[in-house]
Amino acid sequence: MKKRWLLGAVAGLTLSSVTGWVQAQDNTFKIGLVLPMSGPFASTGKQMELAARLYMAQHGDTVAGRKVVLIVKDDTGAPDVTKRIAQELVINDKVQVLAGFGLTPLAMATAPVATQSKTPLVVMAAATSIITEASPFIVRTSFTVPQVVTTLADWATKNNIKRVVSLVTDYAPGIDSEKYFNQRFINNGGVVIETLRVPLRSPDFAPFLQKVRDAKPDALFTFVPAGVGSALMKQFAERGLDKAGIRLIAEGSVTDDDILNNMGDVAVGVVTAHHYSASHKSALNKKFVEAFGKANNGLRPNFMAVGAYDGMRVIYEAAKTTKGGGGEALLNAMKGQAFESPRGPMYIDNQTRDVVHNMYVRRVERVGGQLWNQEIETVTDVKDIGKTR
Ligand code: PHB
């Protein structure tokens, strides 16, 4: 009798502590933000974390009566680490959503975790076309490489560029850049003289730029991931390519706002396409750039920051709809969201879960003593061509 009572008490205790635990869970809405915070892509992680925190500072840390808990983890830019962290966040921390993903291989490695656990995964940075097809639980708020480079190829054709060499970082978004730029440029009647690829880790551009110089194209078309553009620009000038009359046109990561201002005069006149420039002229962007700078010692937000800021918007609004619930309902509430971003208007396509937004052709100019990507042309509501085929 005594023993049975004891067992019952233990069971009761366990049950009530479980109930208490569930209630504690119920009062939070957890976002696992996985970012490269150290290693060669640390600037991406920094920009993204600061932007996510800015969004929370501006919009409060409660949604649907629940406290938003942002759990930030450093994956060092290594795919196996990203995947392991995501698994821990889902299983141990019980996050409702996974977010971040600074590079394509990191997002691709984690996609199965999202599918298996039915956890929405918001890609805020990585840009290879295929990513959203790696899991039905992926939603993207960054951009896609084909959106950008097809816009740039059309601009190049219209601006008297007939022969190019392409030079890209040798991994998925670089290969997307090469494929979609070159295809479009050739379809437009242009000639691609040579296609060059540089390694992702510790790239030395010098020998490749020498080849470009020897090939004497009208322009060099290039892609390198955020943070790497400074080294490329420096060597472009050192090798005298600018003096040789070779124009530089690029995917917008090359003149990333985080590093652009320190590139010096060699960057002036470089034409890129992208979805975001810190100099985008809208009241919302002005407010965003000012608030970001004020919170972070004058730091200029780049496109990585905007991807994270808009990703937080998508998560917050979806959480309001589901009243803090996760899983498929949260995913469905992310699809179709349309809103004004600091980049301009954007929406999440219902079918593809990918971002649709304007593409801007920009030219680097010195304004008020600083270098900016000044928008010169806009193509509206661009979908990812990788999926419309
Ligand atoms: C990517 O890995 O998808 C990626 C990273 C940085 C960029 C663009 C694309 O600037």
Image: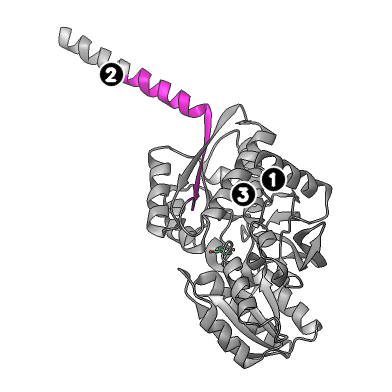
User: In this figure, which residue is indicated by the disc labeled 2?
Assistant: 11
Please state the extent of the stretch shown in magenta in the rendering.
14-37
Tag 1 and tag 2, C-beta contact below 8 Å: no
User: In this figure, which residue is indicated by the disc labeled 1?
Assistant: 298
Tag 2 and tag 3, C-beta contact below 8 Å: no
- From the image, state whether disc 2 or disc 3 is nearer to you: 3
Does residue 83 appear to the left or right of 155 in the view shown? Answer: left
Q: Nearer the viewer, residue 342 or 318?
A: 342
Q: Residue at x 38, y 41 (%)?
A: 91
Element carrying mark 2: helix
Residue 135, given in percent of the width and then of the height, sits at 50, 58
Give neighbour class at mark 1: few <14, some 14-19, many 20+ (Cα, 10 Å).
few
Query: Would you say the beta carbon of the disc 2 residue lies within 8 angstroms of ligand 1?
Result: no
Residue 172, given in percent of the width and then of the height, sits at 51, 71
Specify the quadrant that holds the C terminus.
bottom right
Give neighbour class at mark 3: few <14, some 14-19, many 20+ (Cα, 10 Å).
many
User: In this figure, which residue is indicated by the disc labeled 3?
Assistant: 308
- Mark 3 and mark 1: Cα distance apart in space: 19 Å
- From the image, state whether disc 3 or disc 1 is nearer to you: 1
- Mark 2 and mark 3: Cα distance apart in space: 44 Å
Answer whether residue 116 is visible to the viewer in this image.
yes
Residue 163, given in percent of the width and then of the height, sits at 69, 90
- Which of the marked residues, 2 or 3, is nearer the chain's N terminus? 2
Q: Residue at x 37, y 57 (%)?
A: 80
Residue type at tag 3: Ala
Answer whether residue 1 is visible to the viewer in this image.
no
